[in-house]
Image (spheres, grey):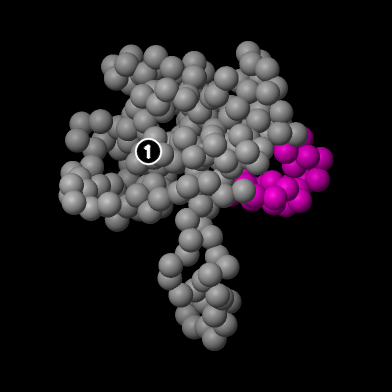
Amino acid sequence: MTVALLTAAGSGTRMGQDVPKQFLHVHDKPVIVYTLERFQKNPLIDAIVVVTLPNWIDFINVYAKQFGIDKLRWIVPGGATGQESIHNGLEAVAADCSKDTVIMIHDGNRPMIDDGIISNSLAVFKEKGSAVAAIPCTEVVFNSKSSTDADVEIPREELWRTQTPHTFTLEKLLWACDQAKEKGLTGMAAMCQLMARLGERTYFSKGSEKNLKLTTMDDMDIFKALLNTERSSWQK
């Protein structure tokens, strides 16, 4: 069984809006619904769990009915951090599913994930035992302690930008959460970061520049443009 765990419990303060970013409407549809639909339509995904803000649980239920998201099986309140929110979602799945269940963790505010990213994540997971979507860094990168100037350049050929999904077994993820609690590892920005802190090797799966995380209003503008853009037929 493969379960998509969507994180949608952030308050979205960097977006500067009154409504959390994952619930902002684009063309009369909330961002989180665009993400839900991608997993709903993919035949490799069996079920979905959404971890969200407690006050928005009823809204998720309404959206699921309105937009036909019948794979949605659990809606779970988030924790104080992203790390805690993921753990809450894992515990909900663990109450109903076996430890060998495949969990694909994905940001609810990455609505442009496509079938190729999902299938490649599962293919790498099957071969390597885990998968983290990533893309190579194409910009020149500097290390700066002052945030105003720098003279230390980091070779971009060695740098990869991770995205979601992150795919692991339920058992492995629960192990990582237990280890984090035992070792006092808190506030990890992503599950792949926690795994690295625990000495686990990260295996990259296919990412995409289009698989952007909606964090600022600039990101929202790019998302709207992508929704209205189709690749020309002559392009490979």
Q: Is residue 160 left or right of residue 139?
A: right
Q: Position of residue 120 (x, y in %)?
A: 49, 40
Q: Quadrant of residue 85?
A: top right
Is residue 55 depicted above or below 173 in this figure? above
- Number of callouts in the render? 1
Query: Which residue is most to the bottom?
Result: 151
Q: Position of residue 226 (x, y in %)?
A: 25, 47
Q: Is residue 41 magenta?
A: no
Is residue 20 depicted above or below 162 in this figure? above
Q: Residues within 10 Å of mark 1 (few under 14, many from 20)?
A: some
Near-viewer residue (63 or 129): 129
Is residue 58 depicted above or below 196 in this figure? above
Residue at horizontal 36 percent and vertical 24 percent from the top: 41
Q: Quadrant of residue 103?
A: top right
Residue range of the region highlighted in magenta in the rendering:
176-202
Residue at horizontal 64 percent and vertical 16 percent from the top: 97
Residue at horizontal 25 percent and vertical 31 percent from the top: 29
Is residue 81 depicted above or below 5 in this figure? below
What residue did someone put label 1 on? 114
Q: Which kind of residue does numbered mark 1 sit on? A: Asp
Q: Is residue 227 visible?
A: yes
Q: Is residue 200 magenta?
A: yes
Q: Position of residue 86 (x, y in %)?
A: 59, 34
Q: Position of residue 158 (x, y in %)?
A: 57, 68
Residue at horizontal 76 percent and vertical 51 percent from the top: 199
Provide the secondary structure element on which disc 1 rests: loop
Q: Is residue 229 visible?
A: no
Q: Is residue 7 left or right of residue 101?
A: left
Quadrant of the rendering where the N terminus is positioned: top right
Q: Is residue 91 left or right of residue 41?
A: right
